[in-house]
Image (cartoon, grey):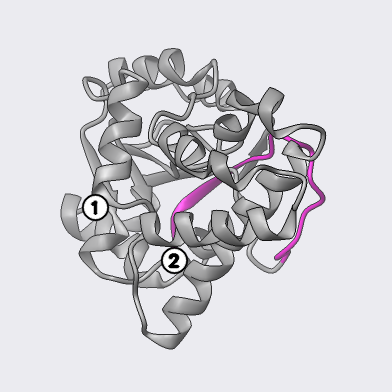
Amino acid sequence: MHHAAYVFDAYGTLFDVHAAVRRHAGEIGPDGQLLSEIWRAKQLEYSWVRTLMGAYADFWQLTEQALDFALRKVPSADPGLKARLLEAYWQLDCYPEVPAVLKALKASGAKLAILSNGSPEMLQAAVKSAALDQILDDVFSVDEIKRFKTDPSVYDMVVTGWRLYPEAVSFQSSNRWDVAGATRFGFRTVWINRTDQPDEYRDFPPGLILPSLEGLLADV
């Protein structure tokens, strides 16, 4: 079913969050994957905890703090790589299918946007690096409201900004917790389960589960 708007989470959905570590895999050594997984897990944990505390710090600060923790947790990784890993995070690779899928959805007449925890500067750099700036209609950052997903006010940014009912929006995320939050808000949700993870939050099920964004082309 075609929707008026397709809104995408950024990190893990459009952009590969593990690309920064992979870019320096030779220097990091055999614990690179572990380092990347800890970095990502702490980045998200810090966003949830700060929202619950009402103590906002932008996502770039949390990304740096999470990397500090990961480097301490994985002593085999050289802490001297910190600056280069952070620099790489500004230009994460997008997944291979992303440009073609977004162009096809745009050609169908749908509006396209990102809705992300990322800071405006992070998102602008990632979007420009992936050459998506001419395809997207908008980029919504939680920095505007100083609360992270899955706070309902985050999802409300889209319907308020675009004057749409929630059911007119198809929301895509690779993060199951994000899909749960968007489902609870009232969006049609699509879980992009790239790594075949088991389902959770079953009381807030996605409308559709896909292994990549390519399945969205059935909507066109």
Q: What segment carries the magenta color?
A: 185-202
Marker disc for residue 185 = 2
Q: What element carries label 1?
A: loop
Quarter of image, res 128: top left
Sequence-wise, the earlier of marks 2 and 1 is: 1
Marker disc for residue 164 = 1
Q: Which of 136 and 57 is in front in this view?
A: 57
- Residue 186: image location, x then y, percent: 44, 62
Answer whether residue 185 is visible to the viewer in this image.
yes
Residue in the image at 38% along x and 60% along y: 61
Residue in the image at 60% along x and 52% along y: 40
Residue type at tag 2: Phe
Instruction: Please state if 196 lies on the left or on the right of 7 as rendered.
Output: right
Q: Nearer the viewer, residue 55 or 79?
A: 79
Residue in the image at 52% along x and 69% along y: 46
From the viewer's perspective, is residue 116 above or below residue 213? Answer: below
Answer whether residue 12 is visible to the viewer in this image.
no
Q: Is mark 2 on a helix, strand or loop?
A: helix
Q: Nearer the viewer, residue 145 or 158?
A: 145
Q: How crowded is mark 1: few (under 14 residues within 10 Å), some or many (20 or more)?
A: some
- Residue 92: image location, x then y, percent: 46, 30
From the viewer's perspective, is residue 130 above or below residue 59? Answer: above
- Residue 156: image location, x then y, percent: 30, 64
